[in-house]
Image (cartoon, rainbow, N blue to C red):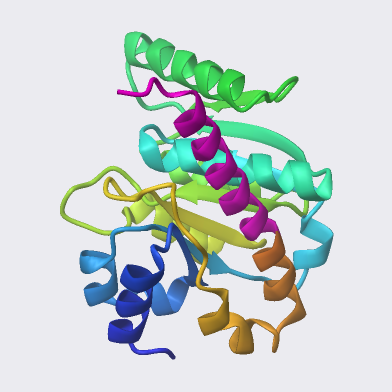
Amino acid sequence: MIPPEAILATAEEQGVNLLVMDFYDLRNNRKLLTLTTCDIIGVSIKRDFEKELSHIVVAYDKGRHSDLGLEIATSFSNSMNSKIRIVRGVVESPEEERDILSRINEKMFDLDLKKVPVERIYPTNMDVTKDLLQNLNQDPEIVIVGAGNQPEQAFSPKTMEIVEKSKYSVFVVRDSRFSEIRARYFWHVIAPRLRENRFIYRLYRIVYGLVKSRKEATSQEDYFAPKM
């Protein structure tokens, strides 16, 4: 494993916007989770990864992590023509749920996502995670889930349970409050390791497309910004 000091130094020098690494290496790396200022995707790749590429499901919690998950899903759809669906475990009040659905619709409008189904899952017991997993484990698809919204932990218990009990590959996305879109990917650092696994290599190409589109969008905003 690359030392966290090397990753942090490279991220700082290269203006890294998005870091992709193995989830099980990431979750135990407190230094990296604490000090990094870029967005992170922790990947847990299963054996049917290539079959899963055609379908993406975003387990939408709420907040910025879930919004990043929709961006990643959109990148997959644009690159691989993957079908997207969204699932929500409903645990909030009706008023809060209405606000969350409005947020989802606004984000889909911003990303130009059309005809994407949103499935609401109501808990049959005290733990909605079991009901979510029953839905997520039906057909091969990549599961995208947010890190969680708890301040004291890097990843919520629900996120950890989904990663550990999902039959299919899971991407855990963590949106940094300090991440800047004007960035370059640190391909030259992780390429030797990615090339050892053709599945991860394909993942890199997809994520690279997301970073590139983010950069282009920022460039356009800068171009049309009023000059002082």
Please identify the quadrant where the N terminus is shown. Answer: bottom left
Q: Is residue 88 visible?
A: yes
**Which residue corresponds to the image point at 36% horizontal and 33% vertical from the top-left?**
63
Name the outermost residue toward the front: 228
**Vertical side of 62 occupied by 76: above or below:** below
Identified at 72% across, 37% down, the residue is 84
* Residue at the (52%, 39%) spot, across then down: 219
- The x, y position of residue 16, in whole percent, is 42, 63
Residue 204, given in percent of the width and then of the height, sits at 65, 67
Image position of 128 (left or right of 115) = left
Name the quadrant containing residue 53: bottom right
Residue 71 is covered by the magenta coloring = no
Q: Which residues lie in the magenta part?
A: 206-228
Q: Is residue 123 at least partly visible in the picture? A: no
Picture coordinates of residue 28, whole percent (x, y): 31, 77
* Vertical arrangement, residue 132 with respect to residue 12, above or below: above
**Quick check: 102 left or right of 81?**
left
x, y percentage for residue 221?
Answer: 48, 29
Magenta part mainly helix, strand or loop?
A: helix
Please say if 113 is above or below 218.
above
